[in-house]
Image: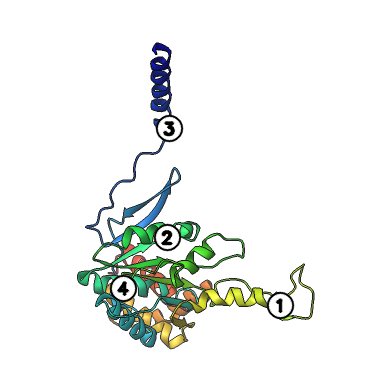
């Protein structure tokens, strides 16, 4: 009996030492926030509140009025508890895809809309994230920015399950908004179009292509974004400059803005915003503003 008690004591001591190496229990998320990032630490995921969310007004986003109207309508349906779709925003870089998602959060946060940002490498945690959100009264956008996959990425199947459900029903208070430069989210190869050509050991290579396309088809609303024309770009430049107190877009500023876009190799809302900051900063440095 004494030997057995000694064995129990030693076992408890070993367990106590092992517990010191285990990560602490997950803390309760700060549900007073309006946005969180999913962060994985020591193999355990946490919802970490974003203390200073990037607030953007819908009025600040120009040249995408149709896309703006569609995502606002879909989000309004969602926050009122009506049927709404997952949204895929694709197209040219810097044209307002991510900003539009941030803007709808700013517009509807007072109506219970919340946002959880999940990086691509953490998409395997989506079922765990949805389980955390399912019983909350708020309405959550899971935001995946700059999304694309290779065929071996584990998050690919996890996202498909959340978008379309598995044996478990999807949660009514969660939608996925994703941005990507690729409409079909995965690379496609010329060889996949050649069904009569042997492609490795696969008997039906066309099935692989269909599998890749099927992910984007699980988003019920597709919004496409295109590069800005010169006039559209200059209009956005004028808007950002006006916010910094520069009321008139004269010939000198137009020339500087166009030169700036040429050095960047693109005309977009992002480049317009960057030019405005650069121009106003130069003015302030020389004491002209």
**What numbered label is drawn on residue 190?**
1
Q: Nearer the viewer, residue 123 or 258?
A: 123
SS assignment at label 4? helix
Q: CA distance from mark 2 to mark 4?
A: 26 Å
- Numbered disc in front, either 3 or 2: 2
- Among the 4 quarters of the image, the one containing residue 206: bottom right
Q: CA distance from mark 2 to mark 1?
A: 34 Å
Q: Nearer the viewer, residue 56 or 272?
A: 56
**Decide: marks 4, 3 in contact (CB < 8 A)?**
no
The residue pinned by badge 3 equals: 21
N-terminal-most mark, 3 or 2: 3
Q: Is residue 77 visible?
A: yes
Q: Is residue 251 visible?
A: no
Q: CA distance from mark 4 to mark 3?
A: 42 Å
SS assignment at label 2? helix
> Above or below — where is 150 with respect to 86?
above
N-terminal-most mark, 2 or 4: 4
- Numbered disc in front, either 1 or 4: 1
> Above or below — where is 202 with respect to 247?
above
The residue pinned by badge 4 equals: 103
């Amino acid at each position: 009996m004494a030997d057995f008690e000694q064995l129990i004591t030693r076992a408890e001591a070993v367990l106590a030492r092992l517990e010191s190496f285990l990560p602490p229990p997950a803390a309760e998320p700060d549900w007073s926030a309006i946005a969180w990032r999913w962060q994985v630490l020591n193999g355990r995921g946490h919802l970490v509140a974003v203390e200073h969310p990037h607030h953007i007004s819908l009025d600040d986003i120009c040249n995408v009025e149709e896309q703006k109207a569609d995502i606002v309508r879909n989000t309004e349906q969602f926050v009122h508890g009506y049927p709404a779709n997952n949204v895929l925003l694709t197209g040219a870089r810097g044209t307002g895809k991510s900003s539009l998602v941030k803007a709808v959060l700013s517009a509807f946060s007072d109506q219970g809309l919340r946002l959880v940002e999940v990086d691509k490498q953490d998409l395997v945690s989506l079922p765990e994230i949805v389980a955390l959100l399912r019983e909350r009264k708020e309405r959550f956008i899971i935001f995946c920015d700059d999304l694309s996959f290779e065929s071996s990425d584990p998050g690919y199947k996890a996202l498909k399950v959340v978008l379309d459900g598995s044996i478990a029903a999807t949660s009514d208070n969660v939608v996925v908004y994703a941005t990507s430069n690729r409409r079909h989210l995965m690379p496609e190869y010329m060889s996949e179009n050649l069904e009569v050509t042997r492609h490795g050991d696969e008997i039906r290579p066309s099935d692989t292509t269909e599998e890749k396309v099927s992910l984007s088809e699980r988003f019920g609303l597709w919004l496409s974004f295109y590069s800005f024309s010169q006039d559209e770009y200059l209009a956005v430049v004028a808007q950002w400059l006006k916010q910094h107190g520069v009321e008139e877009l004269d010939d000198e500023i137009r020339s500087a803005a166009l030169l700036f876009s040429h050095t960047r190799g693109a005309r977009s809302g992002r480049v317009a915003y960057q030019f405005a900051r650069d121009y106003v900063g130069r003015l302030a440095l020389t004491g002209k503003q």
